[in-house]
Amino acid sequence: MLKKLRENGNQTSVTGRDIVRELEYADNGTVQFYSGYETLDVSPSDVLSAAVFDYKQLAGNVTISGLEQVKNSGTEAIINLLEARINVLEKSLMNSLSTSLYSDGTGSSGKEVGGLQLIVADAGTGTVGGINSSTYTFWQNAQTTATSSAFSVANVQTDMNTIYLSLVRGADSPDLVMAGTNAYTAFLGSLQAIQRITSDDMARSGFTSLQYLNSDVVFDSAANTNRMYFLNTDYLRLEVAASRDFVPGEAKMSVNQDAMVTPYTIH
């Protein structure tokens, strides 16, 4: 999912103390048909609110011991070793973040990113961006349970139709379905060979995906095996602090070891 968000342009850089996003949660109630000199409704119409998110921090270290520096003496050898270690760390950080994008935000004592299990909660309610959807019902997400509480080849498309149609609002509709192993397997098995339409763009990007109505159905091993998340990516962002997108800190000698340590962070 992380790769999909980045390639779709859904990762943005942000600054400031908090991440604040304005929300349109209702139509303007003053809109009306009128005739001639009929009085128009000029009453205030409160249609905006704001979700406020805290930054989450993810870090890892690149370490090179004094002995490794000796064995890889020479500028080029040291650079090659350092680049290899940085590549491993970057993949490790991205893997951790990719997994967290499906979390409910309670991991690591609440320090983890609030992922799809928070935003698209099983119960349909919860507090996201400081807004409690039990109080403000416009903030609730749609959810449904698979027929017989399990994904099956026989029922998966009917279940998908139910949740998809509940999410259509005029021109707004889901354009991305992230699916875990059991969910994706059931959907794949429900299709006849001629129906297994794939997206050329998705295939070129290395995604395992199929088409469902106007949505790409993408398999992600990091997703809960028994979940499908129906998303409208017009309203989905991965927001990263402009000055902290896999940024190296100051390299320092370890206090009690013969090693050089360089931290890398993402906020």
Image (spheres, rainbow, N blue to C red):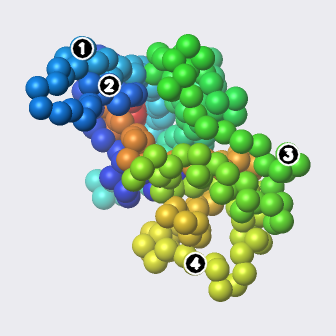
Q: Which amino acid does label 1 sit on?
A: Ser
Residue 120 image offset from top left, x and y in percent: 59, 36
Tag in front: 4 or 1: 1
Q: Say which residue label 4 marks.
A: 197
Quarter of image, res 266: top left
Residue found 28% across the figure and 37% down from its top: 13
Q: Which of marks 4 and 2 is nearer the N terminus?
A: 2
Residue 84 image offset from top left, x and y in percent: 44, 55
Q: Any mark on residue 43, and which?
A: 1
Q: What element carries label 3?
A: helix
Tag in front: 3 or 2: 2
Residue found 36% across the figure and 36% down from its top: 239
Q: Which amino acid does label 3 sit on?
A: Ser
Q: Is residue 199 above or below residue 122?
A: below
Q: Which of marks 4 and 1 is nearer the N terminus?
A: 1
User: Mark 4 to mark 1: distance in Å?
Assistant: 50 Å
Residue found 71% across the figure and 70% down from its top: 188
Q: Is mark 1 on a helix, strand or loop?
A: loop
